[in-house]
Image (spheres, coloured by chain):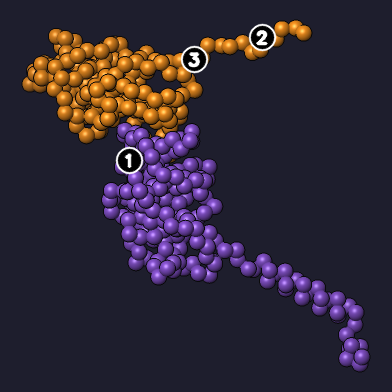
Chain colours: A purple, B orange
């Protein structure tokens, strides 16, 4: 009882307010986990921000378009949705090898800043989620293109997963 | 109860499209853009006597030029070369004749198929990213097939088109840049 009298009501009120404020700040400081589609380009694994993805589909019939750069494979009709099929390996500084279009290869349709693009990948694995704290800045030793177009790298099943900054990749392709 | 005839059924708008191949590329073009077709034995085209010419040809046109058809009235160019495609092997080809300004120009292609009548609802715009990356405005629209199409008869492997398949429709004037346009109009 005696201890209790050392604090005025106002002091207790302030203390409760402060504690609640701290709790609220702490709750907001918990970073949401970020989801990425893990997919393969040549022998490396890349992550595509899952919030950008509209559809993942088999590649099917690609209609080539003349007078386009080599990374534009052509156009595809995905149930009435006409989309550009892009091979981004070359802009990323990767070797251009034949794709297993009849087996593992997929087209990942993304929408970035209102523009739709079908990214052709060798294979897709799963949607993985990571804490912000797990993501490290891209290593310059990755090579200039990959470092430039990665928003970060993360350890994934004992390998490095490069998180693609698709907005930057498309910006380069459009330029 | 009064008779209600419902909305008037207007005839669907249609255009005619000629389908043709250059190498293994399948293209289409509005027949309204084409003034005729000619069968030409490419080896019999008359070459130009370059030594007698007073003008320098634009390099791309010079590369694509095959020869003259019909007593030098029509210059024939390889379509594959104008589109920067791999070279088509053909000795006996078909020549699509187009009007270009005051002249008629021939575009040599591999095979020409029958004319298709297509509804405007089957035409699709190029996706934004493709349109933005086009090096020249050679592509007009895409044709989306609403029913299977077997063109060319015996050449079934290359000419069986499935529902939903897209065909690139070319815009012939877009084949040429401004220098080439001036040359074609004034010098050729």
Query: What is the crowding at mark 2: few (fewer than 14 residues within 10 Å), some, or many (at least 20)?
Result: few
Asked whether the viewer can see residue A118, the reply is yes
Q: Quick check: can you spot residue B141?
A: no
As drawn, which residue projects farthest toward the bottom? A2
Q: Is residue B18 above or below residue A60?
A: above
Task: List x then y, in percent, for residue B128.
Answer: 45, 36
User: Which chain letter matches label 1?
Assistant: A
Tell me if label 3 and label 2 are in contact, CB under 8 Å: no
Residue at (42, 24) in percent of width and height: B147
Is residue B117 shown left or right of residue B70?
Answer: right
Residue under label 3, please give it.
B13
Task: Return the mark for residue B5.
Answer: 2
Q: Are marks 1 and 3 on the same chain?
A: no
Label 1 to label 2, Cα distance in Å?
53 Å
Give the Cα distance between marks 1 and 3. Answer: 34 Å
CA gap, disc 3 and disc 2:
22 Å
| Subunit under mark 2 | B
Q: Residue at x 75, y 7 (%)?
A: B2
Does residue B6 appear left or right of residue B168 in this picture?
right
C-beta proximity under 8 Å, tags 1 and 2: no
Q: On the rendered image, what quadrant is the N terminus of chain A found in?
A: bottom right
Mark 1 or 2, closer to the camera: 2
| Secondary structure category for the residue under label 1 | loop
Residue, disc 1: A69
């Amino acid at each position: 009882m005696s201890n209790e009298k050392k604090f005025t009501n106002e002091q207790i009120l302030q203390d409760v307010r402060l504690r609640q404020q701290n709790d609220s700040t702490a709750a907001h400081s918990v970073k949401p986990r970020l989801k990425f589609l893990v997919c393969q380009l040549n022998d490396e694994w890349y992550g595509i921000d899952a919030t950008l993805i509209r559809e993942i589909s088999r590649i099917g019939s690609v209609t080539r378009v003349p007078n386009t750069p080599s990374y534009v494979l052509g156009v595809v009709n995905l149930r009435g949705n006409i989309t550009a099929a892009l091979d981004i390996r070359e802009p990323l500084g990767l070797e251009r090898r034949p794709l297993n279009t009849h087996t593992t290869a997929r087209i990942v349709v993304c929408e970035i800043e209102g523009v739709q693009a079908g990214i052709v990948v060798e294979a897709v694995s799963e949607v993985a989620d990571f804490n912000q704290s797990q993501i490290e800045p891209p290593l310059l030793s990755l090579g200039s293109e990959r470092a430039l177009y990665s928003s970060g790298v993360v350890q994934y099943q004992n390998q490095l997963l490069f998180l693609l900054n698709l907005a930057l990749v498309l910006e380069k392709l459009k330029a | 109860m009064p008779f209600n005839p419902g909305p008037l059924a207007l005839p669907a708008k249609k255009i005619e499209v000629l389908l043709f191949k250059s190498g293994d590329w399948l293209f289409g073009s509005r027949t309204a853009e084409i003034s005729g077709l000619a069968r030409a034995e490419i080896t019999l085209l008359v070459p130009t006597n370059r030594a007698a010419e007073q003008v320098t040809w634009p390099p791309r046109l010079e590369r694509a030029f095959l020869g003259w058809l019909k007593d030098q009235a029509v210059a024939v160019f390889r379509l594959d070369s104008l589109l920067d495609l791999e070279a088509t092997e053909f000795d006996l080809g078909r020549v699509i004749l187009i009007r270009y300004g005051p002249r008629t120009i021939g575009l040599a292609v591999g095979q020409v198929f029958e004319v298709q009548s297509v509804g405007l609802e089957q035409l699709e715009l190029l996706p934004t990213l493709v349109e933005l990356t086009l090096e020249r405005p050679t592509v007009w629209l895409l044709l989306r097939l609403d029913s299977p199409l077997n063109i060319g008869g015996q050449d079934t492997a290359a000419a069986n088109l499935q529902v939903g398949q897209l065909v690139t429709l070319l815009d012939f004037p877009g084949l040429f840049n401004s220098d080439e346009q001036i040359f074609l109009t004034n010098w050729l």
